[in-house]
Image (cartoon, grey):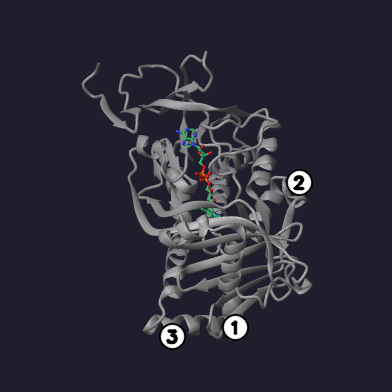
Amino acid sequence: MTSDRTRNQTRGLAFDVPDQHQGERPAPSGIVIVGGGMAGLALALLLRHHGQSAVTLIEAVSLAQGEQLDTPSFDARSTALSAGTLAIFAALGLSEGLLSRAAAIQAVDVSRRQRLGSTRMSASEEGLAQLGAVVENRWLGQTLLEAVRADAGIRLIAPARVTQTRRLKQGYALHFVRQDASAQPEKIECALLVAADGAGSRMRDALGIAAHSDDTGHDALIANIGLSESCPEEADGVAWERFLDSGPLALLPLPGRRMALVWTGPRSLIDRLEALPEADFLAELEQAFGLDRLGRFARAGARQRYPLVLTHACAQAVPHGVVVGNAAHNLHPVAGQGFNLTLRDLALLAETLGATDCPGDLSLLNDYVSRREGDQALIRQASRWLPELFRVRFGPFAHTRQLGLVALTLWPGLRSQFAARAMGLAN
Ligand SMILES: Cc1cc2nc3c(=O)[nH]c(=O)nc-3n(C[C@H](O)[C@H](O)[C@H](O)COP(=O)(O)OP(=O)(O)OC[C@H]3O[C@@H](n4cnc5c(N)ncnc54)[C@H](O)[C@@H]3O)c2cc1C
């Protein structure tokens, strides 16, 4: 083989850079997205919406029609969608289906256990019909997938595994194998390769982009919680974010007198909470959350946990390659910002590329990255800083966080800015 071939082996994936011997073959065209999670599916639809004619999606896990979705994106979790995200889905014509099984967020209540000071942002105060909505991830996935399947310009290859990625002069060549016994290796070339394969992205490695990872030592525990008859009606449509000494706990409204719990804390705490019998788990939740807002809890569904290893890519664009979603930034779930931030990224990426025949053009990709830097840095820092700030019991931060809540309560202007950012309206 040629001497300019640099072979790198990362977790079984071979990739070469670059192929100087492409000769006079026509330049590859089209866009390949690896990873059909929330980011990958949403990007495919946005690219088509903005005029790209050929988009291919390669996903490792089965997305077969009629099977229950069970992928890293579309599992038992629920996602709080900001007003900005809902506006993007509306432009794609997905709102009606999505909202048919979503709970509106009318208010967000932020408080700290055993401390004075709580702040409430409400849709009516912000002049909006709703601040956002909460949707179960499987329904979000179902909605996105149906739209992808209905679009003849999107080729969906799943389940399939990329076995080799090779840099060409003007794009990438990918070798992949479909996950059925008789499948032969296949090859596809593209002008732009999008890494949308999650926080541990192998495509990011293949693009030669490094990432920083920070293991917080904390996990997030999720479960659906059934409300009892004692839950007051005025609690309908309220999303609760409660800061405990161990970390934040969120309860988000779901349709049908249920709430989606996201309880974050040190791994030892989550180990214990996960192992508790249902009744003991509910008792502990009532103690942590208090009984004055939602009354007693009636039931807890299956519990599932997620390690909070925060990751961000050192770069997001290279010639003919771009990194998006969790592969670009994997955030702490406090304030439910990860997917909302990603969708703002994807909307601008698709708009920047428009219908261009050269989607791998680095100047276009760099333009997109530079226009997203500010929002990404702010949300990344805030979601990193917020749990720390509320965890400290004593010292200067203890005072600051109290001031923070009081300030948000007292100065509506400041609160509006905070709310606008949280809703994905401020850019
Ligand atoms: C507990 C919790 C609660 C959250 N709540 C919210 C919230 O309320 N609001 C919000 O905005 N965000 C929230 N988030 C963040 C949100 O879940 C992420 O932003 C989102 O999952 C990112 O999606 P993704 O597609 O980038 O990555 P992933 O979900 O990791 O999907 C990656 C996809 O790539 C596929 N893949 C991986 N490797 C390959 C390969 N080699 N070839 C092909 N395919 C591959 C995987 O199978 C998967 O389908 C939360 C996160 C957590 C952990």
- At which x and y percent is residue 291? 65, 75
Residue at left offset 58%, top offset 63%: 280
> Is residue 425 among the parts visible in the rendering?
no
Look at the picture and state if 185 lies above or below 293: above
The amino acid pointed to by label 1 is: Thr
Instruction: Pick the residue in front: 367 or 172.
Output: 172
The image's mark for residue 97 is 2
Tell me if mark 1 has few (under 14), some (14-19) or many (20+) residues whose alpha carbon lies within 10 angstroms of its own.
some
Residue at left offset 74%, top offset 73%: 124
Q: For residue 71, what is the image quadrant?
A: top right
The amino acid pointed to by label 2 is: Gly
The image's mark for residue 161 is none
Instruction: Pick the residue in front: 46 or 198.
Output: 198
- At which x and y percent is residue 216? 38, 59
Tell me if mark 3 has few (under 14), some (14-19) or many (20+) residues whose alpha carbon lies within 10 angstroms of its own.
few
Tell me if mark 2 has few (under 14), some (14-19) or many (20+) residues whose alpha carbon lies within 10 angstroms of its own.
some
Q: Quadrant of the C terminus?
A: bottom right
| Residue at which label 1 appears | 409
- At which x and y percent is residue 167? 36, 28
Of tags 1 and 3, the one toward the viewer is 3
The image's mark for residue 399 is 3
Q: In which quarter of the image is the N terminus?
A: top left
The amino acid pointed to by label 3 is: His
Helix, strand or loop for disc 3: helix
Of tags 2 and 3, the one toward the viewer is 3
3D distance between C-alphas at marks 1 and 3: 15 Å
- Label 3 residue near ligand 1, CB within 8 Å: no
Q: Which of marks 2 and 3 is nearer the N terminus?
A: 2
Residue at left offset 44%, top offset 48%: 328
Instruction: Pick the residue in front: 363 or 21.
Output: 21
